[in-house]
Structure formats: structure tokens, C-alpha cells
Image (cartoon, rainbow, N blue to C red):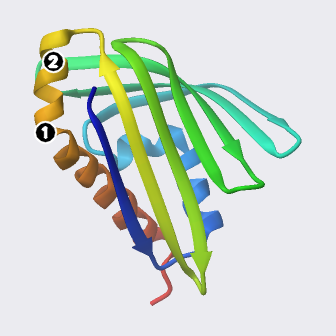
Amino acid sequence: MPKASVKRLIKCKKEHLIDLVLDIEKYPLFVPFCLDSKVYERNEKGDLLFIIADLTIGKGPFKDTYKSDVKFNKKDDSIYVTNLDGPLKYLENKWLFIENKDITEVSFEVDFELKNHFLNIVMTKSFQFGLDKIADAFQKRAEELFSKT
């Protein structure tokens, strides 16, 4: 299964970064390969926020939509995502945000498996590169929106 992680130090408040990650409907504006997004449900229960959303990912003639279950835990500033439907056999990704003096360390881990065995092999070879591009996009967007100049 393709598995990768990335850490970034971003000069802005963790609340802003969490809001950015949870604003799933804006992903097509800045996330590479994200063609569309749709939030179906958004419910709060105590310290937890639950979101059900679709992301359509693609490049060239390849395009697929997957439904995910997103859980934000306000107590530990973490976001945990699993797949519900689509081309993924398995998906688990975790975001963790730790702020220190207006600089936030963002950790992002992804572990997944596609239903298509051949595509799984292809993705394994280029996945860290793709994850770095996505992390770059989030960092750039955060700096554009929230960094003090």
C-alpha cells in the first residue's frame, strides 16, 4: 500500500490551518489534481466535528470520485480521514497541528490502497512526490491567506 508522510512549519495560527483543511469545498481552487469537491454532511457533537464529503481527483483522462469520512477532534487538534466509497480499497490519513509562537507544525500522513492492483503499483512509485506537491499547495494557500507580512 502507498504510504507517506510530510511535516511542514507554517508561519500562522493552527486555527487558521485547521479551518483551511476543513474547508473542503475550496480544495479545487488550490489542491493539485482536485477537480471537484462536495460536502454532504457537517455535524458537531461535543469536541468532535464530523464531515462527509466527496473529492474528485484526476489528471488528463483519469478521474475518479471518492467519498470520505472526516473527523476533527478539537481537543487534540487532529483530523482523521477514512474512505467510505470510490476507487479506494482503504484510506487513512491524519493531520496533526502543533502551534508554537505563531508557527504551526503540520504533520500529514496518508496510507491507502486502490482497488486496482496495477494502479496501486504505479502510485507507490510516485506517491511521496504527489504528497509533497499537495503539502506545498496547502502551505502556499495558508501563507497567502494568513501570514503576517
Residue 142, quarter of the rendered image: bottom left
Q: Earlier in the sequence, mark 1 or mark 2?
A: 2
Q: Residue at x 18, y 11 (%)?
A: 117
What amino acid type should be assigned to the residue bearing mark 1?
Answer: Ser
Quote the CA–CA distance across marks 1 and 2: 11 Å
Query: Could you tell me which secondary element the residue under label 2 belongs to?
Result: helix
Residue pointed to by mark 1? 126
In the image, taking residue 110 as reference, residue 1 lies left or right, namely left
In the image, taking residue 94 as reference, residue 76 lies left or right, namely right
45 to 90, vertically: above or below: below
Position of residue 100 measured from the top left corner of the image (x, y, whole percent): 59, 81
Position of residue 10 measured from the top left corner of the image (x, y, whole percent): 44, 74
Point out the image quarter for the N terminus: top left
What number is the disc on residue 119? Answer: 2
What amino acid type should be assigned to the residue bearing mark 2?
Answer: Leu
Residue 140, quarter of the rendered image: bottom left
54 to 89, vertically: above or below: below
Position of residue 118 measured from the top left corner of the image (x, y, whole percent): 12, 13
Q: Residue at x 30, y 50 (%)?
A: 134
Q: Residue at x 78, y 41 (%)?
A: 48
Position of residue 144 measured from the top left corner of the image (x, y, whole percent): 41, 71
What number is the disc on residue 144? Answer: none
Report the residue that reaches farthest toward the right: 46
110 to 88, vertically: above or below: below
Report crowding for label 1: few under 14, some 14 to 19, many 20 or more residues within 10 A (C-alpha): few
Q: Residue at x 71, y 32 (%)?
A: 50
